[in-house]
Amino acid sequence: MKELFSIPNLLGYFRILMLPVFLLRYYQAETKEEYLLTFVLLGIIFLTDALDGYIARKYHMVTDFGKILDPISDKLVQGTVAIAVSFQYFWMKLFILIFLAKEIYMACMGLYLIKVKKSLNGAQWYGKVCTAFVDAGVLILLFLPDLPGIAGNSVIWLMIAVEVITLAAYIRFHRGILKSKNV
């Protein structure tokens, strides 16, 4: 029970609870100042992601529950922001489909590895790069609403490429784990 309320996990809960606040503020924003406030709110949400990982590692507060909660909260944030952006950019719908496919694969494989290995590997470096890239991409799309179509679509297609490459890297990684004698 103690691990459910560790500081890193509380930050994960905070991120999830802030999503409706972000959406409400984003859709009600009418002035540049209101958009800036929404941008700051989203920045705080992203900052808590970096902070919870740092605290968990530095103070030895890494938990199995946290290994599940952190990526779930990350993906809820990314998915929520992507859906918000999808109303402005047609190709975001394709990004969301690929994003969902990757995340469903990751969830299923994670559950399978927990069942078989009784443990879960943390995110690989390319997963962290993908998260950072998608976060940066959606921030650009959200807060530069007057971005020319070709520039916005280029950001989206780069995000799609990073998602596909990351999915392929994880499939290869998981095949290696499944072929090893540890499974």
Image (spheres, rainbow, N blue to C red):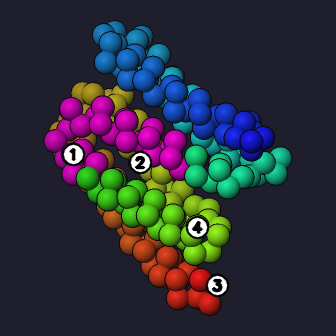
Between disc 4 and disc 3, whose residue precedes? 4
Any mark on residue 134, and which? 2
Mark 4 or mark 1, which is nearer to you? 4
Task: Say which of 70 and 151 sits in front.
Answer: 70
Between disc 4 and disc 1, whose residue precedes? 1
The residues tagged by marks 4 and 3 sit, at their Cα atoms, a distance apart of 12 Å
Secondary structure beneath dot 4 equals: helix
Between disc 3 and disc 1, whose residue precedes? 1
Q: Residue at x 38, y 23 (%)?
A: 23
Mark 4 or mark 2, which is nearer to you? 4
Q: Indicate the quadrant where residue 169 lies.
A: bottom left
Q: Could you say where residue 180 lies in the image, as x and y percent from the top left?
A: 58, 88
- Disc 1: CA contacts within 10 A as few (<14), some (14-19) or many (>=20): some
Q: Indicate the quadrant where residue 13 lies.
A: top right
Task: Give the residue number, with chain letter if any, for mark 3.
Answer: 182
Q: Amino acid at mark 4?
A: Ile
- Give the answer, above or below, for where 49 lies relative to 22: below
Q: Amino acid at mark 1?
A: Lys
Any mark on residue 114, and which? 4
The residues tagged by marks 3 and 1 sit, at their Cα atoms, a distance apart of 39 Å
Q: Quadrant of the C terminus?
A: bottom right
Q: Could you say where residue 18 lies in the image, as x and y percent from the top left?
A: 51, 25
The magenta stretch is 70-96
Mark 1 or mark 2, which is nearer to you? 1
Any mark on residue 93, and which? 1
- Side of 118 relative to 156 (left or right): right
The residues tagged by marks 4 and 2 sit, at their Cα atoms, a distance apart of 27 Å
- Residue 125 visible? The answer is no
- Residue 22 visible? The answer is yes
- Disc 3: CA contacts within 10 A as few (<14), some (14-19) or many (>=20): few
- Side of 143 relative to 94 (left or right): right
